[in-house]
Amino acid sequence: MRADRLVATLLLIQARGRVTAAQVAAELEVSVATARRDLEALSAAGVPVYPQPGRGGGWSLVGGARTDLTGLTGTEVRALFLLAGPGATVAPEVRSALRKLVAALPEPFRADAASAAAATVIDPAGWGHPGRARPVLVDTLQDAVVRRRKVALDYHNRAGRRTRRVVDPWGLVDKDDVWYLIAGTATGRRTFRVDRIAEAGVTDRAAERPADLDLSREWAGVVEEIEQRRSPVSATVLVGEDVLSVLRTQFGRHCEPLDVLADGRVRVRVAAHMALSIAEKLAGWGAAVEVLEPDSVRAELARLGSELLAQYAQR
């Protein structure tokens, strides 16, 4: 992800004081041309880095000091840490450097930087929903999380009923292009799908947030609760590697490869809320998928096959 590379490049300059495009390329395992474009992109975006031509030259931060980031505005600091918080797939070393970077920031920026770094989690394992465009309200909600302001939501629940409520936004989760807001309410933690939020107004009231809040841990709890409700039935199937990639899309997190057999087929565990749901997703594969167990899924497949045969067999 380019955003991660840009952050890593900035931190590399921060750590070494001055770097060349070749050094960045070697450190981040990219081409020299890519490293040069990233450095130029940082400069063009207003991040205070600049090139020094000639022998012994390279790219440095304005001011020269390794911890001098006073050239960054508050908005730029928030943007930087939003890119490299739990929502970014950066290495542990980069996260460690970010924590040190927070301490080096000017005092007025530290709170926003820390909030931004913890504002978003990315969970790449989908729940079978197709990908979709990023909701326009994500930026508004991220701003409320960083500034710790209560948000008034007009929300459509699963039944389509519209409700109005004021919540304390804790953070956002991007789960395979489906966004969720984790928030505190009068009844405890709640999770809201962002694409069901009709309107969101950031208020001037300070939001409450648990002192020991860990957004990744909170989301793990949400996932566990939903998984228990969604997928009480599992099945073990044998498929070819070409089928496995599509099953991952169909079942999302509930597709778990177990092992590879001598004939090249993969033994996979899939799950859904009932046996019929598994059978419906597998039926279209015909003989390309072999269900080993349970009998309930095999029975549903046999029933579906019998119905199709009765309706479409030539007479």
Image (cartoon, rainbow, N blue to C red):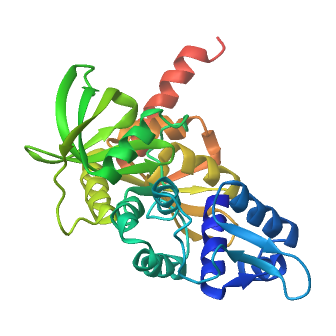
Q: Residue furthest right?
A: 54
Q: Position of residue 156 (x, y in %)?
A: 28, 24
Describe residue 263's horizontal placement relative to residue 205 as left or right: right
- At x 54%, y 22%, the residue is 308
| Picture layout, residue 160 above or below residue 34 | above
Q: Is residue 185 visible?
A: yes
- At x 32%, y 43%, the residue is 273
Q: Position of residue 242 (x, y in %)?
A: 70, 53
Query: Which of 42/107 is in front?
Result: 107
Quarter-of-image position of residue 41: bottom right
Q: Residue furthest front?
A: 63
Q: Position of residue 250 (x, y in %)?
A: 53, 43
| Picture layout, residue 106 above or below residue 100 | above
- At x 18%, y 25%, the residue is 164
Query: Which of 278/62 is in front?
Result: 62
Q: Residue furthest left?
A: 186
Q: Is residue 1 visible?
A: no
| Picture layout, residue 170 above or below residue 9 | above
- At x 52%, y 60%, the residue is 268
Describe residue 14's horizontal placement relative to residue 35 as left or right: left
The number of numbered badges drawn on the structure is 0
Q: Position of residue 100 (x, y in %)?
A: 44, 82
| Picture layout, residue 22 above or below residue 125 | below
Quarter-of-image position of residue 166: top left
In what quadrant of the picture does the C terminus appear?
top right
In what quadrant of the picture does the N terminus appear?
bottom right
